[in-house]
Image: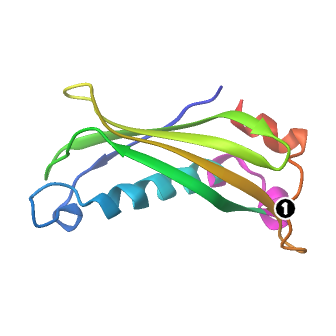
Amino acid sequence: MQIFKKTITVSKEDIDDLNHVNNVRYVQWVQDIAKEHWLTYASEEILERYSWFLVNHFIEYKSQALLGDKLLLKTYVPKVEGVSTTRHVEIINPKTNQLIVKSKAKWCLIDSKTQRPTRIVPEIAELFN
């Protein structure tokens, strides 16, 4: 199973009235790393032919992040079946090794022409291994 990673630094724009990262920002980061992972490994042909539709999303807030914190975002797809995948995202403070957020989302593969769900072909499933 391939793990895609990215490091970010919490900026002033990420902070809410309680002086920690706004919950909506975590949701955006989960979305961003999923998209970046897909765009990094999918070929132009795959990108033209397919897209993803979010079916459901669960996010658990375990701790808080503050202005200036460096955060490690990790995503992986341990399960691919039929027309869908289950994607996990973890946001960790590497300085303290503390888990800040964990997310699990179900995504459905869509044929770009028909806008209908389509089976995940081996070529796509292999992108996550």
**In screen coordinates, is 113 left or right of 62?**
right
Q: On the rendered structure, is 106 left or right of 48?
A: left
> Eyeballing the image, is 88 above or below 111?
above
| Residue 42 lies in the magenta stretch | yes
Instruction: Residue 108 in the image: state x and y as whole percent.
Output: 74, 55
Rendering coords of residue 111 (x, y %):
86, 65
- Crowding at dot 1, Cα within 10 Å, few <14 / some 14-19 / many 20+, comes out as some
In this view, the residue in front, 115 or 127, is 115
Which residue was labeled with disc 1? 117
In the rendered view, tell whether residue 56 sits above or below residue 70: below
Q: Quadrant of residue 13?
A: bottom left
Quarter of the image where one finds residue 12: bottom left
Local secondary structure at mark 1 = loop
Q: Residue at x 83, y 50 (%)?
A: 83
Q: Which of the pair 118/93 is nearer the observer?
A: 118
Q: Residue at x 33, y 61 (%)?
A: 25
Front in this rendered view, residue 2 or 86: 86
Q: Is residue 99 above or below residue 85?
A: above
Q: Is residue 2 magenta?
A: no
Q: Quadrant of the image for the N terminus?
A: top right
Characterize the magenta stretch by its predominant secondary structure.
helix
Q: Residue 48: x and y, percent?
A: 81, 67
Magenta extent: 39-50
Residue 76's spot in the image, x, y percent?
Answer: 58, 35
